[in-house]
Amino acid sequence: MGSTLAITAMGVLSIGAGAADSPAQASISTQERTGWIQTYEIPSGPMATALNIFAYANGLHVAYDARVTQHLTTPGLAGVYSVKDGLDRLLHGSGLAYRFADNGRSVS
């Protein structure tokens, strides 16, 4: 059985004390963000580390239970990819899936 990662744009996800959405970030739709093309040089190694690097590079927040990735590794990601294609390659064979949260909000 696979697990699903929830992905939102940075600055849009509010955790805890109800921070307001950032208008600048909210104006960039998830659909627009997933089509961005970028060069990646993410080394092979722990899945959690690779996801953190990928999220930072794209201004994304990836929400998941850390136990899900505890023993997972990735061969890394090198080359030019869209966000969607990069995530697909990074997670390939891991049993993990992802979804982009509606309205920039993550639901566990």
Image (cartoon, grey):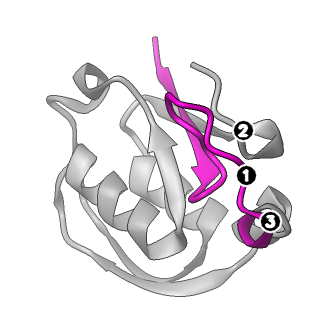
Who comes first in sequence, dot 2 or dot 1? 1
Q: Are marks 1 and 3 in contact (CB under 8 Å)?
A: yes
Q: Position of residue 89 (x, y in %)?
A: 47, 59
Is residue 13 positioned above or below 54 on the image? above
Q: Kindly indicate whether the residue at mark 1 contacts the one at mark 2 (C-beta within 8 angstroms).
A: no
Badge 3 amino acid: Pro
Instruction: Label 2, secondary structure: give it.
Output: loop
The quadrant in which residue 93 appears is top left
| Residue at the spot 52% in from the left edge and 71% down from the top edge | 58
Quadrant where the C terminus sits is top right
Q: Which mark is residue 55?
A: none
* Element marked by disc 1: loop
66 in the magenta segment: no
Q: Nearer the viewer, residue 73 or 36?
A: 36
Q: Amino acid at mark 1?
A: Asp
- Read off the magenta span: 1-25
Query: 15 or 18, which is in the foreground?
Result: 18
On whether residue 16 falls in the magenta region, the answer is yes
- Residue beneath disc 1: 21
**Magenta region, mostly helix, strand or loop?**
loop
Looking at the image, residue 28 sits to the left or right of residue 57; the answer is right
Residue of label 2 = 101
Front residue of 24/97: it is 24
Q: Which residue is mark 3?
A: 23
- Where in the figure is residue 77, as x and y percent of width and height? 35, 70
Q: Nearer the viewer, mark 2 or mark 1?
A: 1
Q: Residues within 10 Å of mark 2 (few under 14, many from 20)?
A: some
What is the C-alpha distance between the residues marked 1 and 3?
6 Å
